[in-house]
Image: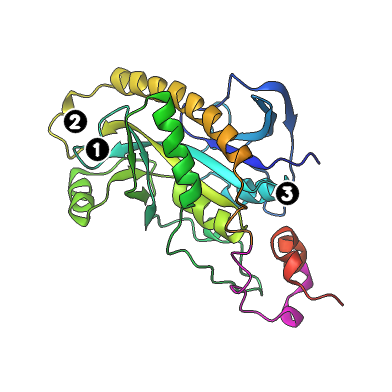
């Protein structure tokens, strides 16, 4: 299997990277089922990346149906050390306007039906990974630099509240989230960030603002055509940002700071690891099993 250091996960509207050269597809099988789609491997300015459309080409998965574990485990099998993620979001604060980019550094979980898709652990092997700072700050710095290079209005930091979906918020919910101090709202990134940390992959995301959530007084005047227009503009800018960011990741001198993230997180003693579960998680925990 071809090994790739940098992975990209595309969200709503971002199903391809037109600047990719020497494109080939890579089908990856995982113990957690099939990923959202075949990976699209290619070069961006000479840097090899593995691109995966989160909802599959054609947008076939609801946020709840996305096979998060398979997606991240497949990234691990491909040798990915860094994941750059992109997703469309609604704004919960006036300062985050449509077409702005937000690079959040915190998440808040409001999902209800994704317990199995939120961790690789279980079935006899227990792990409790640190997640106080869920986003790689180094990748966040790189994304911020790339956004500035492209000329996109960008906000660094803030909290992404992850809701279940697929319906959007009620106005009451939206107002409560604002009172809590949430910044943007989406439906996908939390599970990716948790699983990436368990897989010892550095993760950061760019949130592409398409609209103000339903709390805003102008919400009723927003049309689907307007949202699609903003989404298309965001997608093109995101492609340019990712192209620039990939070069910066490939040339940075410091290693992945999460390469040992679960070293002290596995509570179950290795001699109690069920063989079937160990085989399932071997790509992640194999290096922590003592030699026989």
Q: CA distance from mark 1 to mark 2?
A: 7 Å
What residue is shown at x 66% (from left), y 35% (from top)?
50
Label 2 element class: helix
Please determine whether, in this image, residue 147 is positioned above or below residue 118: above
What residue is shown at x 32% (from left), y 24% (from top)?
227
10 Å neighbourhood of mark 3: few (<14), some, or many (≥20)?
Answer: some
Residue denoted by label 3: 77
Residue 206 lies, in percent from the top left, at 43, 38
Query: Marks 1 and 3: in contact by CB < 8 Å?
Result: no
Task: In the displayed orientation, state which residue is furthest to the left.
Answer: 217
Q: Nearer the viewer, residue 224 or 4?
A: 4
Residue bounds of the magenta highlight: 260-276
Residue 244 lies, in percent from the top left, at 53, 29
Q: Which mark is residue 213?
A: 1
Task: In the displayed orientation, state which residue is furthest to the front.
Answer: 253
Q: Is residue 212 left or right of residue 147?
A: left
What residue is shown at x 58% (from left), y 47% (from top)?
67
């Amino acid at each position: 299997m071809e090994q790739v250091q940098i992975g990209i996960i595309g969200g709503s509207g971002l199903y391809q990277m037109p600047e990719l050269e020497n494109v080939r597809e890579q089908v990856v099988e995982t113990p957690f089922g099939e990923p959202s789609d075949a990976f699209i491997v290619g070069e961006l300015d000479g840097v090899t990346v593995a691109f995966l459309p989160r909802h599959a080409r054609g947008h076939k998965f609801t946020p709840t149906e996305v096979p998060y574990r398979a997606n991240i485990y497949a990234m691990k099998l491909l040798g990915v050390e860094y994941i750059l993620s992109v997703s469309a979001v609604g704004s919960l604060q006036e300062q985050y306007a449509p077409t702005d980019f937000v690079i959040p550094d915190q998440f808040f979980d409001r999902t209800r039906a994704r317990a199995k898709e939120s961790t690789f652990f279980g079935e006899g092997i227990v792990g409790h990974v640190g997640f106080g700072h869920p986003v790689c700050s180094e990748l966040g710095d790189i994304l911020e630099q790339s956004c500035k290079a492209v000329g996109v209005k960008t906000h660094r930091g803030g909290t992404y509240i992850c809701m279940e979906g697929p319906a959007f918020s009620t106005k009451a919910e939206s107002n409560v989230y604002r009172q809590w101090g949430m910044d943007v709202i989406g439906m996908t990134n939390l599970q990716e960030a948790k699983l990436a940390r368990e897989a010892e992959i550095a993760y950061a995301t760019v949130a592409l603002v398409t609209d103000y959530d339903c709390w805003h007084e102008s919400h009723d005047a927003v049309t689907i055509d307007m949202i699609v227009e903003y989404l298309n503009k965001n997608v093109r800018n995101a492609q340019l940002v990712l192209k620039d960011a990939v070069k910066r990741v490939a040339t940075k001198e410091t290693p992945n700071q999460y390469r040992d993230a679960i070293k002290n997180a596995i509570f179950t003693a290795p001699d109690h690891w069920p063989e079937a579960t160990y085989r399932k998680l071997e790509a992640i925990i194999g290096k922590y099993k003592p030699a026989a």
